Image: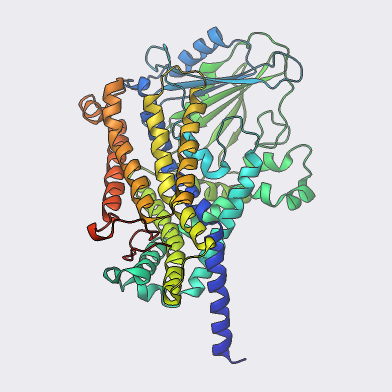
Amino acid sequence: MRPDGAKEGLRQSMAWLHTWAGLLLGWLLFAIFVTGTLSFFRHEISLWMKPELRGLGAAHAGTPALAERWLRAHAPQAQNWTVRLPDAREPALRVSWREPAARPGERPRFETRWLDPASGAELRPRPTFGGDFFYRFHFELRSAEKSRWILEGRWVVGLATLAMFVALLSGIVTHRRLFADFFTLRWAKGGQRAWLDAHNVSGVLALPFYLLITFSGLMIFHSLYLPAGIAAAYGMKDGAYFSDLAGEPAGSAMRGRGGARAATPAPGPMPPLALQAALDQARHHWPDLPLESLSVQRDGPEGLRLELRARDGGRLQYPPPRLVLDGRDGRLLHAVDRGTPATRVYGVLYGLHMARFADWGLRWTLFALGVLGSAMIATGLLLWRVKRRAQTARRAARASAGERLVDALNIASLAGLALALCAYLLANRLLPAQLPQRMDAELQAFFGAWGLALLWALWQPTRATWRRLLALAATGLAALPLLGAASGAGHLLDDLAHGEHVRALVELGWLVAAALLGALAWHLREPRAARRATATPPGDGEARPC
C-alpha cells in the first residue's frame, strides 16, 4: 500500500472512531460537561439556593473556639468533629459530626449545621443539595446523598470520559484542515457546513482545555479503574497506598480514602481539646495563610487527633498544606506539605481539574471554556443527524426509526437538560422551606422534568418540540427573580442594595441563560407559511418531517 493510501485509511478509521465514540456516549457527555461547568461556581450556587444565609457578616478570629463550644453543647458524644471556617464563597460557619451508631451493625449518622460566624447562633437554611448536586452528578450520576450506585456511576462516567478522550484524539487526526477551517467561518451557508464550522471552532478554540480536563478526570479515579497494580505493590488490607498518596505516615489515624479508621470508642463526652495550642502551631507554620478547616478524630477512649488545613487558594497542587497534631496538648505529630513526587503529580492533576486555585477572573475563563466544550459536544451530536438528513433528502425517503430516535435523544439531552436544570432551581424557590424530604423533592423535580422531556421528544421529535422546551426553560429561569421576591428569598435588585454581590451575580447568570435560551427558541420559530411539525434540529433551514 502506498504511503498516501495508508494515511487515507488511517484517517477514515479515525473518522469512524471519532463519530461513534462521540455519538454513542455524547448525550451523557453533554450532561456531564454542563454540570461540571456549573460546578466551577457550586459554592456560589449553593449560597443562592440557601437564602436564609443572607446578611452574614465577616468572619472573626474567635470562630474556631465558637465552633468548639457549640459542638460540645450539641454533639458531645460524636466520633469526630469537622469545622469549615467561613470565607467569601461560603460565609457561614459549617460544623459537622458523626454520631455513634445507635445499635450494633448500624452505620453512624452524619450531621451538618450552619452557624452565624459572629454570634454562633444556629442558622436553619432550607434543606437542599444546592450546587453540590451538579458537582456530584458530574462524576457519580447519583441522585441522592445515600445512593447505592456511587461506584457504578463513577464507572459509567469514567467510560464516557474515556470515550471523549478517544474522540478528541481521533478528531485531531480526522480533521486534516482543522486549524485552517477554524479561520474559515461559513455559518451563513446554513445546513451541514454551518454545523461543521461551529463544531470546529468550539473544538479548536479550547482543545488543550478539553484534553487536560478529560485526562485529569480519568486520573483522579485511577485507583478505581486500574486497581491491579496498586494491589500488587501495596496490598489493599491496610490502605498503605492511600496513606502514601495522602502524604501521611503508616499508622496514622487520619488516613486517606482507603486507610483504616480508628476503632469506634465507647460513647462519652469528647475529651478536652488543646485548641489554642493547635492554632498557635498553625500560625507558626503558616504565617501568611489563613485556616480553612479543622477536624477532630477520637483516638481511643481519651486520645484525640486534630488535623488543621490551610486555605491555600493560590497553589495549584491539591490538597493544601496540613498539620496533624495531638489534640490533647497541641503537639505536632507530622506536617504534610508537598509529599512524594508521585503525590505531587497526582495533586497537580487533581488541582487542575478542581480549579480550587482559580481567582474570579480565571474561574470565569474556565467556565467559558466549559461552555465551549458543551457547545462542541452539542454541535457534534447535531452534525451527525444533519448529515443523515441530507442523505435521506437525496434518497427522497422518510427518516428511519433509528434516525427518529436520535432526533428524540438530541432533543431530550440538550433542550431537556435545560428544562431539568430550570425545574431544579424552580423547586428550590417554590417548595416550602421545611418540607419533609425536601432535598429529594428537588431532585425529583429535576429528573421528573428530564423524563417528561424525553417522553415528549419520543412522541414528537420535531422542531416545534425543540422550540417549546427551550421556551419553557427560558421562561422558568426568567421567573426566578419574581419567585424570589414573592417568597421573601430576595431578588437581584434587593441583593445589590444589601451588598449580596455573589447572590446577585448568580441570579444575573440565570437571567443571561434565560435570554440565550429565549433567543434560540425565537430563532426556531416556524415561518407562518409552514406551521407544521418538523424534526429539523436548530439551525437547519429545512422544515420537513423526519
Image spot of residue 358 (x, y percent): 40, 44
Of residues 61 and 534, the one nearer the viewer is 534
Picture coordinates of residue 174 (x, y %)? Answer: 50, 74
Q: Does residue 309 appear anywhere in the picture?
A: yes
Query: Where does the N terminus fall, quadrant-wise?
Result: bottom right
Residue 81 in the figure: left or right of residue 242:
left
Left or right for 156, reference 201: right
Determine the residue positioned at 54% across, 78% down: 11
**Residue 79 located left or right of residue 443:** right
> What is the number of callouts on the image?
0
428 or 227: nearer the viewer: 428
The quadrant of the image that shows the C terminus is bottom left
Splitting the image into 4 quarters, where does residue 6 fall?
A: bottom right
Q: Residue at x 31, y 33 (%)?
A: 502
* Quadrant of res 394: bottom left
Residue 388 percent across, percent down from the top left:
46, 69
Task: Name the spot of residue 283 as percent of width and height, x first.
Answer: 47, 27
Residue lying furthest bottom = 2
Position of residue 460 relative to residue 474, above or below, is: below
